[in-house]
Amino acid sequence: MPILSGTARIAGIIGWPVAHSRSPRLHGFWLERHGVDGAYVPLAIRPDHFATAVRGLAQAGFAGANVTIPHKLSAFTLCDSVDETAHRAGAVNTLLFQDGRITGSNTDGWGFVANLRAHGVAPDRGPALILGAGGAARAVAAALQAEGASVTIANRTPERASQLAADLPGLAVVSWEAVGDALRDHALLINTTSLGMTGHTPLDLDLAPAPDGLAVADIVYVPLETPLLAAARARGLRTVDGLGMLLYQAIPGFRAWFGVTPEVDDALRRFVAADLLPA
Ligand code: ATR
């Protein structure tokens, strides 16, 4: 931990719980690398204290904060203004406190797309099929649409898929049972469900019918190679793991709070990944 001055810039991550978050490690790496006079701290804030705590952080001179589960919708409601990405996602993951105002953005979708590009996968390479209809699916779908991709979603609970399609014009829906068949018509498959995460059941999907050009992305990053990604790799398909999205989504906040544009590189990836290995 560096010695801070009286004008150090302070930001953090607000969650409940927050102990699992890798964001302090990630931002701490960049702070040290760039010699920033600043700190990024975990902020465990209960849902019923969220609004009071955020206003207090702003009044206490924090530069801003990231917001994670379960606060992303509350953050959206609380902000004095939100940008287009937050508006489309209906949720906020990055807060900026400036001139007495709280502004919000959502960098999850941007992070997903930036990570795709870093893996040589163009977001508009062809039709995308998203599995899941939660907050992550919404952010990813909105970002891919903004890149000009045609996007279809499938979700176990069809009502949530229909709701998302109603909120994002142009979004198509297929049934959860039809995902295997739908693979044939897609160039990009993205898992945004919790299936495949350590402690959860794997996604049960046969990739045999997938076209050779299908790229497969997972936003789950524990484990780094999910059963879905392992199957895609075995099938010879291009894969994109979920860690990169976590790393990239952090860039806009760091830049806004600390005035330096940080980079995602192998050293950062290794540093954060080292904390994901089973104990
Ligand atoms: P987040 O905001 O992180 O995306 P979420 O809102 O809890 O999280 O969404 C989790 C997603 O994983 C949902 O699409 C959920 O499907 P339902 O809407 O049907 O609940 C999906 N999911 C979780 N467990 C699943 C399972 N066993 N089979 C299929 N989908 C599952």
Image (spheres, rainbow, N blue to C red):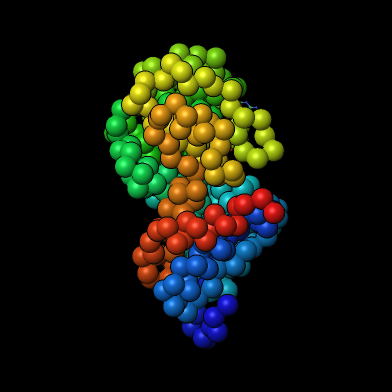
Query: In the image, ligand 1 is in what quadrant?
Result: top right
Residue 234: image location, x then y, percent: 47, 29
**Picture coordinates of residue 233, whole percent (x, y):** 45, 32
Asked where in the image residue 213 lies, by quadrant, the reply is top left
User: Is 36 drawn above or below residue 26 in the view shown?
Assistant: below
Residue at position x 54%, y 54% from top? 273
Instruction: Left or right? Give the position of 77 relative to 189.
Output: right
> How far from the left and from the top, in percent, is residue 116?
37, 42
Q: Which residue is more in the foreground, 70 or 177?
A: 177
Would you say 77 lies left or right of 108 here?
right
Residue 255: quarter of image = bottom left
Residue at left offset 51%, top offset 29%: 231
Given residues 223 and 150, the one toward you in this image is 223
User: Residue at 41% across / 20% down in the picture?
Assistant: 210
Residue 175 x, y percent position in the rendering: 51, 16
Looking at the rendered image, the quarter that the N terminus falls into is bottom right
**Residue 106 in view:** no
Q: Is residue 26 visible?
A: yes
| Marker count (numbered) | 0
As displayed, is residue 69 above or below residue 25? above
Query: Quarter of the image containing the C terminus?
Result: bottom right
Up the image or down, 12 lies above or below 113; here it is below
